[in-house]
Image (cartoon, rainbow, N blue to C red):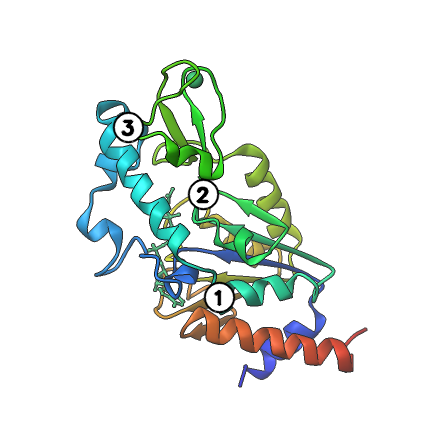
Amino acid sequence: MLPEGLQRTLARARKAVAFTGAGISAESGIPTFRGDDGLWSKLRPEELANFDAFLRNPQLVSEWYAHRRHVTRESRPNPAHDALVEMEDLFDKFIIVTQNIDNLHRRAGSKNIAELHGNIERNYCLGCGARYDGEEFEDNPTFTCPKCGGLIRPDIVWFGEMLPTEEWEKAEAAAEEADVMFVVGTSAVVYPAAELPMTVNRQGGKVVEINIEETPLTRIADYSLRGQASVFLVEIVEKLKELRKVGKYTE
Ligand code: OAD
Ligand code: ZN
């Protein structure tokens, strides 16, 4: 059962944001970053996920992303991603703001998405800017541009890099006006992304956290749902469908 207050929030909310992190894809078999089994417990971000590391050892960094691309291509969206596809029709305005690069929200069928940290299926050449998106990229084992011989890098945000301006502005604008934000499967420690729930909180919107553990955000969340993303998102979507049909609380 969802808390009574949360049900009232859902009934009234017209503008919603789902802010997602690696935890939403954990049930698809994609490793998260932090925690005992997280990628950053075995690998050092400073050796892999930044531009200097890439220039120092492009082959190593490229192979790591090729591996992660392989893992994500082999995996599939899970019921949590599917629930967010349904959510799009249950609010007047809805956007997914994701920190994930795994492309699973798109593959699930969500349309309005701001990808704050890029997407592992997009790549571009540092030499000539040519783009290598989707399947065509894996054809080239040397990770260099067939057009100019330059290095091809993933179109993702590495540590120390700026977030894509347009995506960030969309995310901030959505947070500024959201009646409710669902914060799903993120440790909420990587900035500036982690500011977004604070923005919602500041302007009087409700913050609903869904996570198997407590996070630094838990103390500002209006509701903290402790458990798997799929379980609670499916329940919330069911509740929304019921509320929208009945219209009991609508103004
Ligand atoms: P983290 O690995 O930091 O956090 C994953 C969160 O998901 C944790 O809080 C887990 O408790 C939670 N979790 C795990 N399984 C879950 C499940 N089934 N249901 C609900 N919650 C679950 O991942 P992010 O917060 O996404 O940055 O990390 C943020 C950024 O740090 C990433 O985008 C990446 C990384 O360095 C870049 O690549 C720029
Ligand atoms: Zn090139």
In percent of width and height, residue 249 lies at 75, 79
Q: In the picture, which quadrant includes the C terminus?
A: bottom right
Left or right: 18 in relation to 102: right
Name the residue nearer the viewer: 123 or 41.
123
Look at label 3 and name its amino acid: Phe
Which quarter of the figure has residue 74?
bottom left
What amino acid does circle 1 point to? Ala
Seen at 47% across and 30% down, the residue is 132
Q: Position of residue 31 (x, y in %)?
A: 31, 57
Residue 64 image position (x, y, % from top left):
27, 40
Q: From the viewer's perspective, is residue 149 above or below residue 236?
A: above
Residue marked by disc 3: 54
Mark 1 element type: loop
**SS of the residue at dot 3?**
helix
* Residue furthest out toward the front: 139
Question: Which comes before the other along the chain, label 2 or label 3?
Answer: 3
Is disc 2 placed on a helix, strand or loop?
Answer: loop
Q: Earlier in the sequence, mark 1 or mark 2?
A: 2
Determine if the C-beta at disc 2 is less than 8 A from ligand 1: no
The vertical placement of 208 against 108, above or below, is below
Query: Neighbour class for label 3 at 10 Å: few (<14), some, many (≥20)?
Result: some
Q: Which mark is residue 192?
A: 2
**Ligand 1 lies in quarter:** bottom left
Does 78 sit left or right of 58 as displayed?
right
Question: Which residue matches tag 1?
Answer: 221
Numbered circle sitting on residue 132: none
C-alpha separation, residue under disc 3 versus residue under disc 1? 37 Å
Looking at the image, can residue 122 be seen?
no
Distance CA(mark 1)–CA(mark 2): 18 Å
